Image (cartoon, helix red, strand yellow):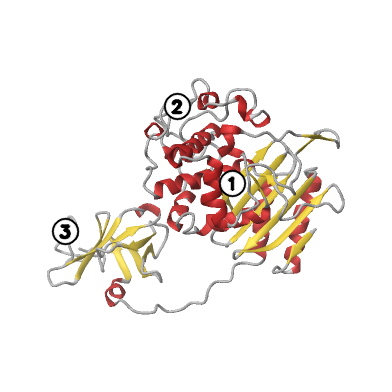
Amino acid sequence: MTSSETLLPGTGRALLHRVATAQSEGRAPSLVAAVQRGGQIAWSGARSCVDGHEPDGDTQFRIGSITKTFTAVLVMRLRDEGLLDLDDPLEKHLPGTDVGQVTVFQLLGHSGGLKAETPAPWWERTPGAIRPELADVLGEKPVIHPTGHGHHYSNPGYTLLGSLVERLRGDSWAEVLRREILEPLGMDRTTPQACAPHAGGWAVHPWADVMLPEPAEDLGLMAPAGQLWSTTTDLLRFAAFLAQGDERVLRASSVVEMHAPSAPPEAGDWAGTYGLGLQAVRRGNRTLLGHTGSLPGFLAALWFSVEDDVAAVVFSNATSGPQISTVAADLLEIVADAEPRIPEPWCPLPEVDEGLLALTGPWYWGTQVLALKLLADGGLEFQPLRGAGRASRFRARPDGTWTGLNGYYAGETLRAVRADDGTVDHLDLGSFVFTREPYERSAAVPGGVDEDGWRGLAR
């Protein structure tokens, strides 16, 4: 089964081939995928071992740890409402856990040093009812690494965040999720329990073409780490939100905050980092954001590229086999590379700010030349004209200064320093002085400028 309405035939054929190959070589009972471009589903396809019974965009699969991204969004909403600060220790809002020194930020980014899993038995294949209290989830000595020193993935950490949501909202995690994310985004096929039509979970024997059904347990307190069932259609709606934000759920600036790396990656995994409930991977020159998930009987992956405005979702009902993360990334790149995003038409600014216009052009930090450019949104871009260097974008403040948004100068202040006659003497950026000429003698250059000025070899 395939559907492609907006892509070129060759692109659709490449997508179908990738999905068919993944299902066949991965020995998956079924595999379903969909790609979104410009906010619209551009292609969907599926393969199944039972002819005529391929899943579609309305068929639920279990999405495992992609659930964590939903939990992270709920926590960010609490922060935006002023109910907590990301640097708050957990103890401030959820006392008595024995890991209260770990901050909300560290839990979101898996840098709290907590264990990866609960005590035995294997939580993904046993009823959540056998772990009725947080102490049962955490076990003895739940912190095994120095807190805040690096990334160590922790499923119990997201149980704590789910319990934090319940404590501050006074309602169950599932109900808060439905009310604050699923309903506003129209994700009515994303649920804590399976709702028909849904796939069944299977384990495929590693050395023979035979299958075994997997149990689908209610995870109880662990639900915020991996409980949800969803469809490709619903997760692509979620991907659009995660790329751009939605004021009904979370503003764009908070979503962008989730994209940023929150801790150094684990040693050897230099191509991937973790933000706040979101994974980030580098594929060539492209950054993909999203999350992967697995539970016995199911694999899931969601990746999106903000720059390309493309997202891909892949599900399979197999415990292992298909390399779901790679398949989803490949589908995204097939579309982004074969049919790159068409840029918006260039248009001049609606009006000119003469004061800002006068600041544009070359500036010198010592002898290095940088260009200051006025952006369409009223911000500024400052970047070297030659070679590598410290480039940043800046957002205007009401007081006439600008705040760095990225790179070395993120959070730093850029200001135009004026002489007594009102003309701009220099730019000050984090105490660095930028002048219109290299070491301009009339400007306030720290340390002054030699009275004899520039000289050749003979002087």
Viewer-nearest of discs 2 and 3: 2
- Number of dots carrying numbers: 3
The CA distance from mark 3 to mark 1 is 53 Å
Q: Position of residue 52 (x, y in %)?
A: 86, 54
Please, is residue 4 above or below residue 72 in the view? below
Q: Which is nearer the eye, 260 or 35? A: 35
Q: Residues within 10 Å of mark 3 (few under 14, many from 20)?
A: few
The CA distance from mark 2 to mark 3 is 58 Å
Query: In percent of the image, x 23 and y 63: which residue is there?
Result: 439
The disc, 2 or 3, on the residue closer to the chain's N-terminal end is: 2
- The answer to whether 435 appears left or right of 249 in the picture is left
**Quadrant location of residue 136?**
top right
Query: In percent of the image, x 16 and y 58: which residue is there?
Result: 448
Please, is residue 328 above or below residue 334 in the view? above
Q: Considering the image in quadrants, where does the N terminus appear?
A: bottom right
Element at label 1: strand
Which label was assigned to residue 448? 3
Q: Residues within 10 Å of mark 2 (few under 14, many from 20)?
A: some
Q: Position of residue 452 (x, y in %)?
A: 15, 64
The disc, 3 or 1, on the residue closer to the chain's N-terminal end is: 1
**Quadrant location of residue 383?**
bottom left
Query: In percent of the image, x 22 and y 65: which residue is there?
Result: 426
Q: Position of residue 212 (x, y in %)?
A: 81, 34
Q: Name the residue beneath numbered marker 2.
A: 97
- The answer to whether 380 appears left or right of 455 in the picture is right
Q: Residue extending furthest left?
A: 420
Q: Considering the image in quadrants, where does the C terminus appear?
A: bottom left
Q: Name the residue beneath numbered marker 1.
A: 291
